[in-house]
Amino acid sequence: MLSCEEVGERSSAWLDDELGWWEGRLVNFHIKRCAMCRSVYEQYRSMKQSLAELGEGGGAALDPEVRSGLMAEFRGSVDRDG
Ligand SMILES: [Zn+2]
């Protein structure tokens, strides 16, 4: 099983379809069982959708600094589980 921290690290890659199918399954499985990771994931997904609507290129068009800032914030909320 993945820890909450590991799921947090993989959620963005999963959203970007960068995970292998097995890792994606593990993340999906964890999120379905863990309310905290699910809410964090849903927040991240809606945030990513909002950002994608800002530019034609979607997430790929994001300024790397903005993207890493968002990721830090996302991970910070995951790390609370400790
Ligand atoms: Zn979790």
Image (tube, rainbow, N blue to C red):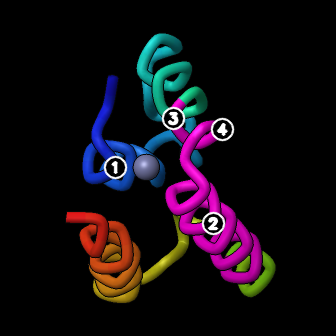
Name, please, the residue furthest toward the left: 82
- Above-or-below relation of 23 to 47: above
* Ligand 1 is within 8 Å of the C-beta of the residue at disc 1: yes
Say which quadrant the C terminus sits in: bottom left
Please say if the residues under marks 3 and 1 sit with CB atoms less than 8 Å apart.
yes
Task: Provide the residue designation for mark 3.
Answer: 30
Gap between marks 2 and 3, in whole Å?
A: 12 Å
Say which quadrant the N terminus sits in: top left
In the rendered image, residue 14, in percent from the top left (x then y), is placed at 52, 40
Does 33 appear in magenta? yes
* Residue type marked 1: Cys
Secondary element under disc 4, as helix, strand or loop, is helix
Q: Is residue 76 left or right of residue 48?
A: left
Please say if the residues under marks 1 and 4 sit with CB atoms less than 8 Å apart.
no
* Residue type marked 4: Lys
Mark 4 or mark 1, which is nearer the start of the sequence? 1
Task: Provide the residue designation for mark 2.
Answer: 39
- Above-or-below relation of 21 to 63: above
Which class describes the residues within 10 Å of circle 2: few (<14), some (14-19), or many (20+)? few
Mark 3 or mark 2, which is nearer the start of the sequence? 3
Gap between marks 4 and 2, in whole Å?
A: 10 Å
Q: Residue at x 40, y 82 (%)?
A: 70
Please say if the residues under marks 3 and 4 sit with CB atoms less than 8 Å apart.
yes
* Ligand 1 is within 8 Å of the C-beta of the residue at disc 3: yes
Residue 3 seen from this side: yes
Q: Residue at x 35, y 67 (%)?
A: 78
